[in-house]
Image (cartoon, grey):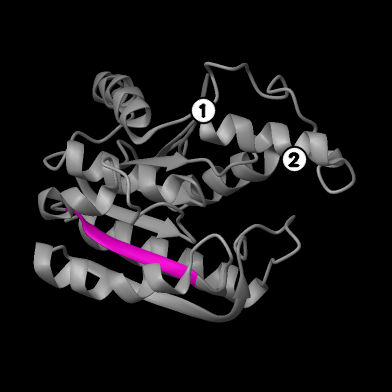
C-alpha cells in the first residue's frame, strides 16, 4: 500500500522515502511526492496506517475533523498506534523493493518526514545508517522525548546529513525541546542543521492546512532539493 512515482526518463533515480503526517495518505501528499519526483527522484510514499486500513478506511473523515471532535480523536488514535520500532521495521521492505527496481538508483537513500514522522525519519536513519545519507524533517514531533525509544538517544548512530525545520509557533513541539537540540547535536556529533521558520505554525508546508505559508512551503522545497541533490547525487 505504497505510492511510488518517478520521472519517465533519465533513470535510474536516487531513492527518497516520504513519510506521511498524522492525517494519513491523501491526494495532497501524492502531489508532494510527485513534485519531488519531478526533479529526478524515485519517491516512495508508504501508508503507515496499513495495519488499520487502506486510504480512507482509518475510521475518520478528514473533511469533518474541524467540526466533529470524534473524527479528530480517531485520527490521534491512529497516530498513537504507531511506534518508532514499527516504522523502522516497515522501512526494510521499502528498501528491499527499491533495490530490486531497475528504475531506482543503487546508492544512498534519502527520507523526508512531516509532523509525527519527524521522529520516524530520525529513528530510521539511526537504524539504517549505511543506507540513509539525507534526512529532512519538518515540524517533527517526538524527536526528543522522555521515552526509552526517543530518537535523540541514538543520534550518534546517524550518519546522514540532517535538516530539522520547525515552526516558530507550534504547540506540538515545545520550546524546551528546541532548546535541548543544540546540545544533543553537539554531544552526539550528529551532522544536523536546525532552522526555525519565523511567524509560522504547525503544517506550514501543506497547502490545504490552515497554517499554510507559501513562502515557507517554497523554502521547504528549496531545502529538500538542495539536501537531496548534495547527498544523493555525488
Residue 87, relative to residue 53: is it above or below?
below
User: For this view, does 141 lie left or right of residue 189?
Assistant: right
Magenta segment: 160-166
Q: Can residue 186 be seen? A: yes
- Mark 1 Cα within 10 Å, few/some/many (few <14, many 20+)? few
The residue lying toward the viewer, choosing from 219 and 198, is 198
Numbered badge on residue 5: none
* Quadrant in the picture for residue 43: top left
User: Measuring 32% from the left and 51% from the top, which residue is drawn there?
Assistant: 146
Quadrant containing the C terminus is bottom left
Residue 40 visible to an observer of this rendering: no
Identify the residue at horizontal 14%, vertical 72% (top origin).
186
**Residue at horizontal 47%, vertical 60%?**
138
N-term mark: 1 or 2:
2
Task: Report the residue at 30% width, 36% height from top.
Answer: 12
> In the image, residue 50 lies at what x, y percent?
54, 19
Viewer-proximal residue among 55 and 2: 55
* Vertical comparison of 22 with 25: above or below: below
Relative to 135, is 164 above or below?
below
Q: Residue 72 carries which label?
A: 2
Q: Is residue 227 magenta?
A: no
> Magenta: predominant secondary structure element?
strand
> Residue 81 — which label?
1
Mark-to-mark CA distance, 1 and 2: 14 Å
Which residue of the protein is positioned furthest toward the front in this rendering? Answer: 146
Amino acid at each position: 500500500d505504497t505510492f511510488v512515482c518517478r520521472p519517465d526518463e533519465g533513470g535510474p533515480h536516487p531513492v527518497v522515502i516520504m513519510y506521511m503526517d498524522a492525517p494519513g495518505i491523501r491526494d495532497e501528499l501524492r502531489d508532494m511526492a510527485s513534485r519531488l519526483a519531478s526533479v529526478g527522484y524515485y519517491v516512495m510514499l508508504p501508508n503507515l496506517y496499513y495495519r488499520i486500513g487502506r486510504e480512507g478506511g482509518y475510521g475518520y473523515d478528514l473533511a469533518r475533523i474541524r467540526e466533529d471532535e470524534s473524527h479528530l480523536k480517531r485520527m490521534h488514535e491512529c497516530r498513537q498506534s504507531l511506534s518508532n520500532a514499527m516504522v523502522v521495521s516497515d522501512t526494510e521492505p521499502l528498501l528491499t523493493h527499491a533495490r530490486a527496481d531497475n528504475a531506482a538508483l543503487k546508492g544512498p537513500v534519502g527520507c523526508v518526514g512531516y509532523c509525527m514522522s519527524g521522529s520516524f525519519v530520525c529513528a530510521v536513519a539511526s537504524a539504517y545508517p549505511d543506507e540513509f545519507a539525507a534526512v529532512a524533517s519538518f515540524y517533527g514531533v517526538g524527536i526528543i522525548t522522555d521515552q526509552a525509544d526517543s530518537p535523540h538517544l541514538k543520534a550518534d548512530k546517524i550518519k546522514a546529513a540532517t535538516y530539522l525545520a520547525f515552526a516558530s509557533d507550534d504547540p506540538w513541539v515545545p520550546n524546551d525541546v528546541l532548546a535541548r537540540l543544540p546540545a544533543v547535536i553537539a554531544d552526539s556529533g550528529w551532522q544536523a542543521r536546525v532552522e526555525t521558520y519565523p511567524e509560522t505554525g504547525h503544517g506550514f508546508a501543506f497547502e490545504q492546512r490552515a497554517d499554510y505559508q507559501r513562502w515557507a512551503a517554497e523554502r521547504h522545497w528549496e531545502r529538500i532539493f538542495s539536501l537531496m541533490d548534495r547527498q544523493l547525487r555525488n
